[in-house]
Amino acid sequence: MQIRTYTIWLMGLTSSGKSTIAEHLVNILQNKDIPILHYDGDEVRSFFGKDIGFTEDDRGRVVETLAHLAIKANNAGINVVVSALTAHQTAREHIKETIPNLLVGHVYCPIDICIARDPKGLYEKARNGEIDTLIGYNSTYQPPVEPDIKLDTSRFSAEENAHRLYRFLENHIKYS
C-alpha cells in the first residue's frame, strides 16, 4: 500500500500566523516520522529578489512557484505545507486545478490583531505611505470560499491551531 501525499495550503492576511502554524505542524508530523516540507511565500519571494514585486502577476508567479515545488515534493513522496497570502482568486483557482490532494486552510485573524503583531513592520509602512500594496490594508482581502479548515489565531495559539490541523488531517486523509 502506498500512502498518498498531500499539500496543505495555509492562506490568510499578513501576520495572521500562517508560517508559525506551518512550522508547528511540521514539527508535529516530523515527530511522527511523517515526511513533510514547509514552503513559505516569503522564502520564494526572497529567492527571486528584486526581480519580483507585488503586482497581481508577480504574486501569481510566487504562487505558481510554490505550487510547482509542492507538486514535485508530493511526487517524491513528501507531504507539503505551504504558507502564503494567496489573495487573488486566479491564484486560488490555479492551486486547486494543479495540485492533487490539496487541502486549503484559511488562517483567520482580525486585521487589528495582525497590525499589532506586524513582525516585519509592513502595516506601519503601509500606514506611513511607504508601501501601497499590502493586501488587507491597502486593498480588500477576500477570504477563501469554503476552505477545508478555518484556523482562528485570535482564539487559539499557533500551536493549538497546528494541533487542530493535525487532528483534521488524521480524520480526513485517505490512503490509496
Image (cartoon, helix red, strand yellow):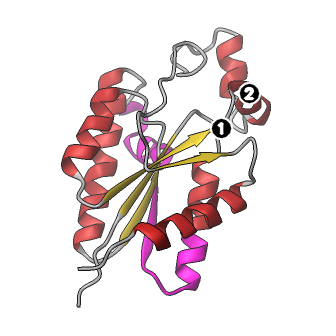
Give the mark, 1 or 2, whose residue is nearer the N terminus: 1
Would you say the magenta stretch is mainly helix, strand or loop? helix
Residue tagged 1 = 15
Residue 115's label in the rendered image is: 2
Q: Residue at x 23, y 91 (%)?
A: 1
Residue 111 belongs to the span the image colors magenta: no
Q: Relative to the observer, which residue lies in front, 8 or 78?
A: 8
Q: Relative to the observer, which residue lies in front, 160 or 15?
A: 160
Q: Residue at x 56, y 61 (%)?
A: 165
Left or right relative to 141: residue 66:
left
Left or right relative to 64: residue 35:
right
Q: Quadrant of residue 175?
A: bottom left
Q: Residue at x 42, y 24 (%)?
A: 54
Q: Quadrant of residue 126?
A: top right
From which residue to which does the magenta span run? Answer: 26-51
Q: Relative to the observer, which residue lies in front, 43 or 159?
A: 159
Q: Residue at x 47, y 67 (%)?
A: 169
Q: Position of residue 104 (x, y in %)?
A: 41, 49
Left or right relative to 67: residue 41:
right
Q: Quadrant of residue 28?
A: bottom right
Q: Amino acid at mark 1?
A: Ser
Instruction: Find numbered disc 2 in the image and state the secondary structure of the residue it sits on.
Output: helix
Q: Position of residue 151 (x, y in %)?
A: 60, 48
Residue 91's label in the rendered image is: none
Q: Position of residue 31 (x, y in %)?
A: 58, 84
Q: Position of residue 81 (x, y in %)?
A: 45, 60
Image position of 9 with respect to 143: above or below: below
How crowded pointer 1 is (Cα within 10 Å; few <14, some 14-19, many 20+) is rated as: many
Q: Do callouts 1 and 2 mark residues in contact (Cβ within 8 Å)?
A: yes
